[in-house]
Image: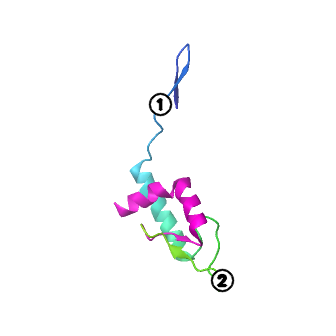
Amino acid sequence: MNITSSLRTIPTEPEKPNPKEIISSISAESSEMEKSKLCANCGTTPNDSVKLKLCSRCQSVYYCGPACQAKHWYEGHLHNCKAIRA
């Protein structure tokens, strides 16, 4: 959101996530992961060559490797993860 003046646009702080929405998202994310183990980022399923690992902080989502974990983290899991551990 920006506040516009006659001379320039002044950026405001980004909106913070609503805790109730985070909890709802966490519940949905967690229950979907429990139904079938999939990498939360790319959707890979476990097999002989791929072993999924749980997020070490919240232990509610799986990842096939560090690259997928980092990508998913910065795409928004960091907010959910912190809320789960709180």
| Residue 86 appears left or right of 56 | left
Q: Residue at x 54, y 54 (%)?
A: 74
Q: Magenta: predominant secondary structure element?
A: helix
Give the x, y percent position of residue 44: 65, 73
Q: Nearer the viewer, residue 57 or 60?
A: 57
Residue 3 x %, y %: 51, 24
Check residue 20 for magenta coloring: no
Q: Is residue 82 above or below residue 64?
A: above
In the rendered structure, find residue 30 and report the number of the disc placed on it. none
The residue identified by callout 2 is 49
Secondary structure under tag 1 reads loop
Q: Amino acid at mark 2?
A: Ser
Residue 70 among those drawn in magenta? yes
Crowd tier of the residue under label 2, counting other residues whose Cα lies within 10 Å: few below 14, some 14–19, many 20 or above:
few
Region in magenta: 58-86
Residue beneath disc 1: 12
